[in-house]
Image: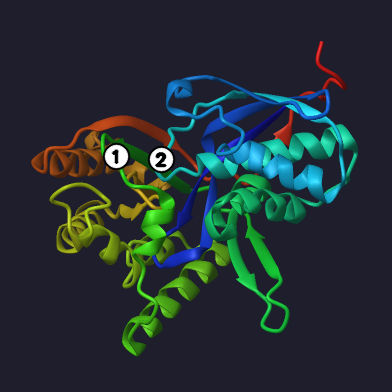
Amino acid sequence: MARAPASIANLGPGFDIHSIALKSPEIQIEFTLAPSGSRILQVEGAYAKEVTTDPQFHASAKALNAVFEQFRRPEGYILRLQVNIPPRKGLGLSGAEAVGAVLCADSAFGLGLSRETVARLAAKAEPQSHMDNVAASSLGGFNVITRTPLTEHVKITTISPPSDLGVVVLVPDINKPSTEAARELLPQTVSTQKYVQAIGYASRISAAFATGNIGAILETIPWDPLVEPVRADAGFYGKGIDSAFLKKEKELLIERFHVAETISGAGPSRALWYSISEEQKALGKNKVGLVKPAMDLVTDRLKSRGHQVQEVFVTKPSPKGARIIRSTPERAG
């Protein structure tokens, strides 16, 4: 049995490059071997009714199939999932499912897989095999995903996040199209100006996490010149919420509260990043703090466009990724 954390990918300009694991929410996966040919999924938890049990489409089953094929395992399996990460809200549910399943198989078969290999196998269940969410759910921490120039081999650099960095995730009642559809929107060419902006912002974010510079993190992660504006203008973050509306919201949050907003993954959830020590000082002064007014601002602006916040996760980045919490039974029954 394994637990795997939710994750936030992209972090502003870091599309397909940056991701970070969260302490909560998370999923739990129990893996049991079964007769050859068996592929059974049992889904429980807060979002069970919103998740498919068809192995052909479920991320955990697709990732497991990759493991079974690569290591030529003839067995079948039963997967029981406790799904407490909201689906289709940009919090990396499919990545966590895939990572948890691969980690269970690694434990059951004694494969001795590295956490990078777990992430690579789990990515086979993701659209275009993108690595950001699975890297965070597997390795924990803040991750930078790159490819080597000559071999195109994926490299993951993992950095322990600053302990003073907090995040609140607001999950709105917005139903976005699929992640695949969100990726299809993206431009294939960009201007030199936007390219330089994106590279500069992403580089500063990476350096800020490496040095623990929370001020630089908060000042930089909201600003994405390439992906978020296109998706916002296409309505992926909610009806009536275009790039100008989103940009204004981010400016207000930074200027008034020193809180940075990013769209979580492909959306529609909003992640509000802040300094925990700044929040504590503000609470000591005004009893309200900075985070609550920031949450109210985003909530009110969503309401102005006819949307509601369904759920709120008050959490932190997690330095640790998925983990085995109990050894796997050899056979069902």
Using the numbered discs, state the Cα–Cα distance from disc 1 to disc 2 in whole angstroms.
8 Å
Q: Residues within 10 Å of mark 1 (few under 14, many from 20)?
A: few
Residue at 36 percent across and 80 percent down: it is 197
User: In the displayed structure, would residue 81 be above or below residue 178?
Assistant: above
Place of residue 110 in the rendered image (x, y in percent of width and height, measured from the top left): 90, 38
Tell me residue 196's x, y (percent): 39, 84
Which SS class for mark 1?
loop
Numbered label attached to residue 88: 2
- Determine whether, in the image, residue 240 is placed left or right of residue 98: left
Quadrant housing residue 30: top right
What residue do we see at 86% from left, 47% from top?
Answer: 71
Classify 10 Å Cα crowding around label 2: few (below 14), some (14-19), many (20 and above).
Answer: many
Instruction: From the image, tell me which residue sits under label 1.
Output: 175
Could you tell me which quadrant the C terminus lies in? top right
Q: Are marks 1 and 2 in contact (CB under 8 Å)?
A: yes
Residue 316 seen anywhere in this rendered image of the structure: yes
